[in-house]
Amino acid sequence: MICDLIQTLIEYGIERELIMREDEIYIRNRLMQALGVEAWSSPEPLKGLTIDELLGKLGDYACENGVIEDSGAYRDIFGTELMGILTPVPHEVNARFRAEYDKSPEAATDWYYRFSADTNYYRAGVISRDIRWKYPCEYGELDITINRSKPEKDPRDIAAARNMPKAAYPACQLCIENTGFHGTLTHPARQNLRPVPMKVAGGDWSFQYSPYGYYNEHCIVFNNEHIPMKIDAAVFEKLFGIIDILPHYFVGSNADLPIVGGSILSHEHFQGGRYTFAMETAPAEKTFDMPAFPAVKACTVKWPMSVIRLRSTDRKQLAEACDTILRCWRGYTDESAGIFAETDGTPHSTITPIARRRGDEFECDLVLRNNITSEERPLGIFHPNPSLHHIKKENIGLIEVMGLAVLPARLAPELELLEKAMLDGTDISADEKLGCHAEWLRDVTARHPEANADNVDAILKNEIGAVFMQVLLDAGVYKRDEAGQAAFMRFIEKAVEYR
């Protein structure tokens, strides 16, 4: 049976053009060594198995025969090791990417995305378990995702990891040194990772896809040097430089401050992909001129958060205009609107920038962010208010800013239980898992007397979408009411005159 499984993996690699038929014996011997198999018999490849199912069966064999410990982390490391044996070395991947790029940027990313899925670096199988739907609202169609793709940690692995020293190599999960890394209980295996080199603003960067992508062709472009995130004048030239290389992608950066920034602020990187978010299609709301930059078209955007959109065919002038708004915002205070550039020397203001092409023009959305806190709101004033934390408590990063909710995995089973409670009229106040939703569910139930077994799922998903819209409104530094928009325009007037 194990020979059948090994041969099935070999046939998978040949079919996906990861290896050639002439590599078969070499790859067989590598796989036999990894699995501790000493005898080979005529195999019969199995049909109809997904790559996840095949790796699962190979992991079962490894556990049953003492090759690895039976835990989620060790199984994942081992499965990645097997795929790493099938994955071509970096120079072969880079050469193929360049050959495809000579045809077109689209051909290169089409090939590389498929390659990343075939090597199981991009976890297409587990990502398919995510729950996704759209929420139509006045700002467009927001994307809602309950993230079930990242595996839950095994308690045994958590306990073992506590006793392991934190590895200094690679320095973080975005470092180029992750290429082919074997993995530990404290750092994921990356034997099947092959980043593609890229020159960005004269520096050495690399391009790869996210293993747990939240949208189509969700990619990461990262500096080969382990340096912190920084939003400054140079960031715009970097964004536009990446768009030059991948004109069919958008690319954006998380903010560079805690609370409003991403989960990894220690390593400079951007995220991008081939996907149209609701923010991209949001219309201009108020146009304005920037006399110092006559080639730049400027407007605010009809969006729950506070967004300035700049567009121009003159890339240099556009980058300078973006930097002007950034520098103005960094130092801007408007106490009447609750905007403070800093308190006690701690800076609070930054932006989330997103760049894309519009025909011959470059376009950049600048989302104003501020991470100030208070005693009543220690997680951030411009952060989801506490009444929404039962749905979304985590920081609002680049992906959410553009209109895609990444909601925690716990909501998947809770949603099913909430549907039943809503139909049965059950009081969930004292329920250990569902009690946090009690007040919200009472309100939803009162507003939807029409709820029944056929529509309750749609009702609750729509209400979760409404919560996410409010999350974005809370994260907006200028509120959507008359006073908030007047304050927004006061900043615009200041930025237009700023030097």
Image (cartoon, rainbow, N blue to C red):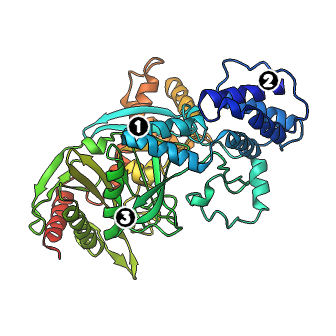
Q: Is mark 1 on a helix, strand or loop?
A: helix
Asked whether the residues under the numbered discs 3 and 2 touch, taking CB atoms below 8 Å apart as contact, a structural biologist would say no
Q: Quadrant of the C terminus?
A: bottom left
Q: Is mark 2 on a helix, strand or loop?
A: helix
Compared with 58, 209 (above or below) is below
Q: Distance between the residues labelled 1 and 2?
A: 35 Å
Compared with 433, 422 (above or below) is above
Q: Position of residue 62 (x, y in %)?
A: 83, 37
Instruction: Give the residue displayed 59% in from the left and 30% down from the top.
Output: 16
Q: Where is residue 160 in the image (x, y as percent from the top left)?
A: 79, 55
Q: How far apart are marks 3 and 2 (CA)?
A: 50 Å
Residue at the limit of the structure toward the front, as seen here = 22
What amino acid type is highlighted by mark number 2? Answer: Asp
* Label 3 vs 1, first from the N-terminus: 1
Instruction: Give the residue displayed 33% in from the left and 58% down from the top.
Output: 241
The foreground one among 275 and 258 is 275
Instruction: Give the residue displayed 84% in from the left and 41% down from the top.
Output: 33
Q: From the image, tell me which residue sits under label 1.
A: 107
- Number of labelled discs? 3
Q: Residue 201 carries which label?
A: 3
Q: Which mark is residue 4?
A: 2
Q: Where is residue 213 in the image (x, y as percent from the top left)?
A: 50, 42
What amino acid type is highlighted by mark number 1? Answer: Ala
Q: Which mark is residue 286?
A: none
The foreground one among 374 and 329 is 329
Residue 74 location, quadrant: top right
What amino acid type is highlighted by mark number 3? Answer: Ala
| Crowd tier of the residue under label 1, counting other residues whose Cα lies within 10 Å: few below 14, some 14–19, many 20 or above | some
Lateral position of residue 192 relative to residue 314, left or right = right
Q: How far apart are marks 3 and 1 (CA)?
A: 23 Å
* Label 1 vs 2, first from the N-terminus: 2
